[in-house]
Amino acid sequence: MNAPFELKDKVVVIIGGISGIGEAIARRFVLAGAKLVIAGINALDQDLQSLDALYIHADVTDELSLSELMAITFERFGKIDVLVNCAGSTNGYSTIMESKKDEYEANFSVNALGTALSMKHAVPYMPRGSSIINIASVSGTQGVPYLGALASSKWAVLGITQTAALELGSKQIRVNAVCPTSVDTPRAYAKGGEPQLRMERRSIPMGRIAQPEEVAAVVHFLASEDSSFVNGQSIGVDGGFSVGMSIEAYNQLAQ
């Protein structure tokens, strides 16, 4: 029996693994023994350069770039056991009536289309027992005011995840999604997102947003053979946000 959550000799591609959630996943996976490929559009920072990982420049909005990423990984390692789609865009904080077309296009091109195309080009190199994990969002499970462009793209990620789980199940390739709240990374503090953070900290039953390591832990479980019968699921890492508001927020509204 293998050690719990062991990833020894597993070839893992993390798209968007350069910072934030992706960086936390990369660090955790290296400790678990994975052969790691980190892909992204920016160069590795000095801290990540010390990891035992192969860096490949890739742009999820460019299908050829994704195809080349998977082909290079296969040439180097002979397979892809785990694909983590962590590249993301949070473009625009505005109402549906105020949202601009380019906000939708920016979110969909990275979050939805990038996820779909990366799976398309990775699957031919994935053996039986492989796992795909897509980073979605709690905004993909419910409506969120001022985040229509983001939420609609994350709902699309969940639809892609469920469809792929059905189509790839006979190949014994599992596809799941992880749905966090805002995560304590620089992206969460982007200009325009301050009201979202204040709302979440008051409404989330645990009174805070997620830490990147907490998201990485769930991704690690889904990547490992310990989750061998988990398929087509959307797992919240949201402190209870998806089940209702905190009692403090409830009492404030009830007054």
Image: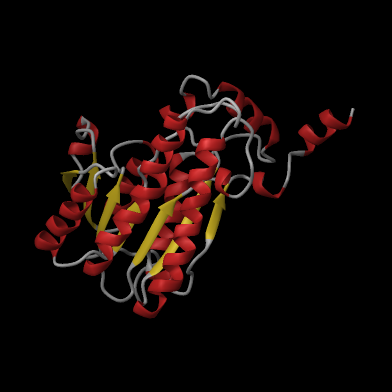
Instruction: Say if residue 182 shows up in the picture.
Output: no
Residue at x 38%, y 72% (from the top left corner):
168
Q: Residue furthest bottom?
A: 170
Q: Looking at the rendering, which quadrant does residue 43 occupy?
A: top left
Please, which residue is most extreme toward the right here? 255
Q: Is 80 positioned to the left or the right of 5 in the image?
A: left
Residue at 37 percent of width and 61 percent of height: 132
Q: Is residue 237 left or right of residue 244?
A: left
Q: Pick out the residue farthest to the left.
A: 75
- Say whether residue 82 is visible: yes
For the C terminus, give its image quadrant: top right
* Quarter of the image with the N terminus in it: bottom left
**Is 119 placed above or below 64 here?**
below
Q: Position of residue 94 (x, y in %)?
A: 56, 26
198 lies left or right of 245: left
| Residue 172 on image: x %, y % | 37, 77
Hey, which residue is sitting farthest top in the picture?
A: 191
In the foreground, 101 or 177: 101
Q: In the rendered image of this protein, does residue 235 appear above or below residue 126?
A: above
Measured as percent of width and height from the top left, residue 194 is found at: 56, 22
The x and y percentages for residue 162 are 49, 64
Q: Quadrant of residue 5?
A: bottom left
